[in-house]
Image (cartoon, rainbow, N blue to C red):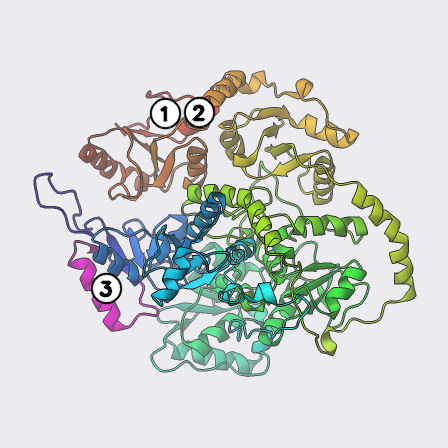
Amino acid sequence: MADVSMVDAGDAPPPLFHEVVFHIIPKKLSEKTISEIRGLLLSNGAVEAPPRKPTTSSRCEIDLEETTHIISETSDFPGYAEAERLMTPVVTTEWVRFSLEKQKIGHIRPFNPDPRFFFREIIATVSELPPGDKEAICGGVIAMGGQYSNQLTRMTTHIIALNLDSEKCKQAMAKKLKVKIVLPHWIDDCLKLGRKIDEKPYEFPDPEILRVDASESMEIPQGPNLKYTHAQSIDSEPPRLPRSGHNVFDGKRVLLGQDLELSKRTRLVIEGVIQQTKGKLVDNPEQADVYVGHFRDGDEYTIASQRHADVGNLTWLYWMFARGEWTNPTNRLLHYPLPRDGIPGMADKAITISNYSGDARLFLENLIEACGAKFTKSMKADNTHLITARAHSEKCVAAKEWNINMVNHLWLEDTYAQCKEMRLTDPRYTHFPRRTNLQEVVGQTRIDLEAIKKYYEPQPEDATMAEPPATVKKTAVKKKMAEDAATTPLQAKRRTNAMEEDSPVPPSTGRKAKEKASSRLHDAMVDVALYQKELKRKGGVLGGKEGNADSPEPKSKSNKRAKSEDSGDEKAAKKKKRPKPTIFLLITAYKGWLDQPQKEDEGKRILADLGVKCVEEAAQCTYLAAPQLVRTEKFCCALARAPVIVSTKWVEDCIEQEELLDTDGYLLKDKEGEKRLNVNLAQSLARAKKNGGQLLGGQNVFCTKGVHGGVEVCRKIVEANGGVCVQFKGTKKPANVPDSEKYILLSGDGAADKAMWPKFKTMAHNAGRAFVIYRSDWLLETAMNQQIEWNDKHTIPGAK
């Protein structure tokens, strides 16, 4: 790599991009634009990273060890997932131009092409809203990739206001600025759904959500182009030959799986198209760069997946043939091989659809069947679920009367993406904006890369528990609980929600900002509810009448009797409400629920009835339960919060007796564990309370790629204790990482890790900082004891 070392203090200021090592993704860029951006970067001190040859462990052609910035107009390229995992910034060409215009390196997030940062093209300002709401909107916009400005400028795209009487709104209209003035409800609805919906119904001068009754019909939007995203797209036509020059398989070795069961004629046609797009056909999965199969099983699938080949299905192939461009098969749910037996817990579901049309409807029908559930064109009383884009239609009315679970398509997409049945009580799945048809955001969910590993990787024994499938019984009581949850404000989410881990979310960059924004948004939703009350809006979402496909079948008399018999129970349920949680419990290393999802679900239900909310994030817990003293990620992170630490016997006894027991007799005591781990738990808790989560406050911790336990685990523990943790890639300290008095490198002892040591020492010397190179055990011991010790105990031999 070319020398990008620091210049002497007495020299002229270094070029703007002197710390940038870039790689340009040519997809969606013209040769002229590529040449322009490369020239701007090189002439301002940047270095272009050389391409890397794919290996069996990675198909990425980007040298992520050296590259500091990837320039791309899309996140849909080979290697994006690896770049995201290593926290290598991916930015659009506008980042280069913006930085040069301002003569300083621009923030990364507004220029991230990942569609999950759905506010990335938004520059918002707030006009005359209460301080709490202003802070919440600011946090939400920034967390989802947008920018916020206190002042109205020519760059502003949105003014968030309740009316047009404010100075900012008058100024924007007087100067005829190209800015949209919208209600704060738009931000609220986008964050609740985790999707950017059309702002038109919320836009002044005459917002539709304030003047149109919920019962009025509306046109179904066209929605995204979902051609070749579901199997019915390819059933009736041969694959298209891409236009000349669109060599999507250039240099790639492709294996067509045996489980495709193609006719001889069809196989020959597909093979011909692959060869014409510069691909090479192979018969051995050990040699394949690309595997095309139908199911997520078999030796071919397993070997190809373990070798990090691109794994997709025929629908994926047809999509690329039709568009003449490469796409990651995990970017669209039905481009990845199907689970042969569906998703656990979905086999007994009967699901129908309402308020969707065209390819969106076909996509959802295929997704239902891919989950292993039964799709029904019309609705009967024995249907278990209604997937609807809005809360108004004949089917919606019948679903409420027959006590059928009614959710939007995000529940179905997340269930398939995460390979487990999602909880119906998550408000995200029961949220229906007033004048929006959610067909406009169908098909945006991606396959969860961690979730699909269970199909091809041997699964290690996990000390923590997975979230079980949730089955909501069809009773009036459960329906009331779901309705209550639907009205509960939703926090802006990180990769996993603080209370439920079921919701998909954006990448993990800027986690601290997201946590703060999430907290602010949660608090501010009460104020948003007050806005709605002040504006005297009626609840509900609008809907139109549908054709025969959406007409429910008449109810039988038995259903009417059942409803009558249940009415008494429903009244009783209204009187007895579940208590508001007073204890937020994190459980770790417990095996009593392992592979027993029904037992776990029932246990958590009983705990919830007692006011105990089981959480999955250490940042939210007030109580921690473990069978003994353990150094799991959850324990290390939670200890920083000084929670009440109890034995899991307390959990078991509370469930068994259905009573919230005093914890005094259940506080965790493990003398043998304390001796083994060199920890005094009582002293650690006392220190944690004094530290206030800031044991590592102001401290940078760098990690090599091969650090024991992984960079991600180290990062979570460091951040839980107030520090900043980044992967060290052999270049300078990232500009967005604060400085600290001492530099710490947590390293493995492999050759690749040791090769980083001289570069790390040079970085520390150039910054005038002391440094240490430790094993990751130092971090675990520091977190468990809640005190920092600088000694050679964890220094790796040869690292001094």
| Kind of element beneath mark 3 | helix
Q: Give the quarter of the figure containing the C terminus.
A: top left
Q: Which mark is residue 559?
A: none
Q: How far apart are marks 1 and 3 (CA)?
A: 45 Å
| Kind of element beneath mark 2 | helix
Going by the numbered disc 2, the residue's amino acid type is Glu
Residue 229 appears left or right of 39: right
Q: Where does label 3 land, which residue?
A: 37
Q: Which of marks 3 and 2 is nearer the N terminus?
A: 3
Q: In the rendered image, is residue 179 in sight?
A: yes
Q: Where does label 1 land, which residue?
A: 794
Which mark's residue is nearer the viewer, 1 or 3? 3
Going by the numbered disc 3, the residue's amino acid type is Ile
Q: Where does label 2 land, which residue?
A: 781
Does the magenta segment cover residue 34?
A: yes
Q: Residue 113 in the image: state x and y as whole percent.
A: 38, 60
Q: What stretch is highlighted in magenta?
A: 24-47
Going by the numbered disc 1, the residue's amino acid type is His
Which mark's residue is nearer the viewer, 3 or 2? 3
Does the magenta segment cover residue 50?
A: no
| Residue drawn at x 40%, y 61% as measured from the top left | 170
Mark 3, residues whose alpha carbon is within 10 Å: few (<14), some, or many (≥20)? some
Quadrant of res 701: top left
Q: Earlier in the sequence, mark 1 or mark 2?
A: 2
